[in-house]
Image (cartoon, rainbow, N blue to C red):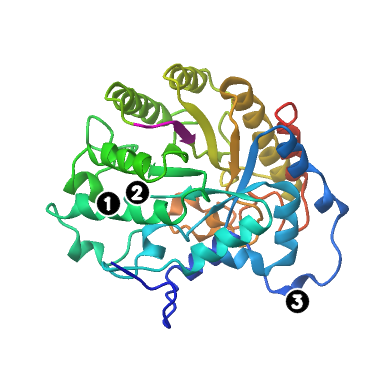
Amino acid sequence: MKDVTTGIKTHSRRQFVSALLSGCINNQEYASGRSARFHDDLRAKVQRSGKYLGCSVARSTFNNPVLLGFIQNNFNTITPAVELKWGALRPSPAEFNFTNSDWMVAFAERRDIAIHGHNLCWNTANPDWFRTVINKSNATSFLKEHIETVMNRYKGRIDSWDVVNEPVLIGGRRPDGLYPGVWLSLIGPEYIDIAFETAAVADPKALRVLNLHHVEQDGTDEFARQASLTLVRQLVRRKIPIQGVGFESHLNGSRPTILAERDIFISRIRDLGLEVLVTELDVSDTNINGDLRSRDTVVGECYRSYLENIIKVASPRRIGLWTIADLNNWYDAVQDPSFKRADGAHHRPGLLDEKLQPKSVYDAFRAGLEGWC
């Protein structure tokens, strides 16, 4: 296996996705000073409490001094949005490229910022060569080799990992609800066991997380909760070394954030001896009407009420935000018509606006963390 990290050629797959997720802008667009609230002590409060408050970033995020300052003052952990996914690390079947991930890990270490690894196994964001190279005879060896190589490289430096990401599909045709992607089709349901067992050997001290989506709200989320609970119980019963369950928490701002069924689900997960994390929190305002202030008020209240409730029920040690700023947010980039606002306006899920000024959403987000840190 060839490591091309130090090679001449630089691989830059998915750079446009990195830019969208980072919310970065050209330095010339913000030459003047910003609000004093960028210098709040949220990060210090979190660290004193022994908790982890994180955000999703891409390498390009660090080219922006305003975003960088906001991150350093408010968060003590980061999640690389793209740089640790297969599509970014694997330019070819025989090569790894750690250029961007190495840079981000070193950058975080210099600033005493922890890293949550995202992710080691997913049915999406895989390289193009998957379709022609991965098959039933080699899928297991590719999966194990990838996890071993990546985790050994960052052993003792990345302290938690989404080992398997989004294993359940809402509306799927399988009775067990598992996502019918490449790993399931080529290996079978045991691909999840293999991923966690391999991760436990590669870095026994890193927290091993099963990252779930669509388990937080009402409606079709109940199917995902039931399928996910069955899956997790089976993993624990088989003594698969899973340690935590991540709630992505991409919330729909027009739906309830306090839900008895979710609280029961959380309690059952915790009864299994597993940690609950919030990994990718943000709020969609797709179906929220009104002017900007009204929309921000609803989004902020969604953040506040969700955080207050999940902190009370789950007592998470780790909470991660996915969308820092409205600028170039990922909701605007999704082509699915269901993500489009009826008025054609841009989404406003961030704590900062398109000019990277703090919004009322930021204050509501902080309010939701009261009592946690």
Q: Going by the picture, which residue comes out furthest to the bottom?
A: 8
Q: Is residue 317 above or below residue 154?
A: above
Nearest to the eye among marks 1 and 3: give it: 1
Q: Residue at x 27, y 51 (%)?
A: 143
Residue linked to disc 2: 121
* Amino acid type, label 2: Cys
* Secondary structure category for the residue under label 2: loop
Q: Which mark is residue 350?
A: none
* Amino acid type, label 3: Gln
**Left or right: where 245 falls relative to 110:** left
Task: Locate residue 311, reporting x and y percent.
Answer: 63, 26
Q: Is residue 238 above or below residue 31?
A: above
Distance (Cα) linking label 3 and label 2:
39 Å
- Nearest to N terminus: mark 1 or mark 3: 3
Residue linked to disc 3: 28
Residue linked to disc 1: 143
Residues drawn in magenta: 241-246
Task: Locate residue 112, reporting x and y percent.
Answer: 67, 51
